[in-house]
Image (spheres, helix red, strand yellow):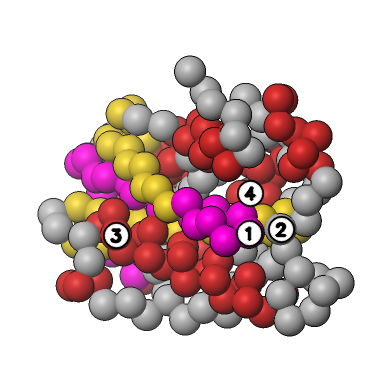
Amino acid sequence: MLKPIINQIGTKRVVLASGSPRRQELIQNLGVSNVILCPSTFEENLDPSQYSFSDYVVSTALGKVREVYDRLSKDDATRPDIVIGADTMVTMDGRMYGKPKTPEHAFEVLQKLIGRTHIVYTGVVIKYQEKEVKFTESCKVHFGKATTAQVQAYVDTGEPLDKAGGYGIQGLGGNFVEKIEGDYFTVVGLPMYRLSVELCKLFDYQVE
């Protein structure tokens, strides 16, 4: 997807406003080998009641991107050309489920998701010079049935604690997923196709 513009991107300082190695790997899989991780210090404390699910994740991603851009731009040696940020949220029955804070919380959330369908939203922001591109993708995820013991065994692995909704589809949590409707990478945390399309547009290459 990025082949026509990869040489241009290769000359830029590309920063991912995240500490997530899996998101970094996804961007590298697009051919952007020079992406640098920089965790944002943006305080993720937006009031969910003031936003739609879609607006909430993209507003959080925007906060991350602007914080990293402003901080790194104070020094010419670290000033980024492109900053990419993302935020992912699991939703069901009108509620948002972020990263559980304790194993007990993770177990509680997973028990609610088992045997039901939820929606995952990932908001993405790309800042390139003065331009800010924002978009959100969503995906329906259907969890199959599982016993209490199976859920507890998964919680005991520790994987759920840094994952929205208490599970990682690309890890052991994928065993709960019966099927999805939408882009798998939206659930992982970075919609690859849409990101590629928007990067191409920023570099004046239109995907027909």
N-terminal of the two: label 3 or label 1?
3
Furthest residue in direction right, as rendered: 77
Q: Are the residues at dot 1 and dot 2 in contact (C-beta closer than 8 Å)?
A: yes
- Alpha carbons under labels 1 and 2: distance apart: 6 Å
N-terminal of the two: label 1 or label 2?
2
Q: Which of the labelled discs sits on residue 55, or is there none?
A: 3
Circle 2 is placed at which residue position? 81
- Alpha carbons under labels 1 and 4: distance apart: 25 Å
- Alpha carbons under labels 3 and 4: distance apart: 24 Å
- Foreground mark, 3 or 4, reads 3
Q: Is residue 71 above or below residue 186?
A: below
Mark 2, other Cα within 10 Å: few <14 / some 14–19 / many ≥20: some
Q: Secondary structure at mark 2?
A: loop
* 137 horizontally vs 114: left or right: right
N-terminal of the two: label 3 or label 4?
4
- Foreground mark, 1 or 2, reads 1
Whether residue 123 is in magenta: the answer is: yes
x and y percent of residue 98 in the render? 37, 64
Look at 63% across and 59% down and name the residue there.
129
Q: Which of the labelled discs sits on residue 22, or is there none?
A: 4
Does the rendering let one see residue 79?
Answer: yes
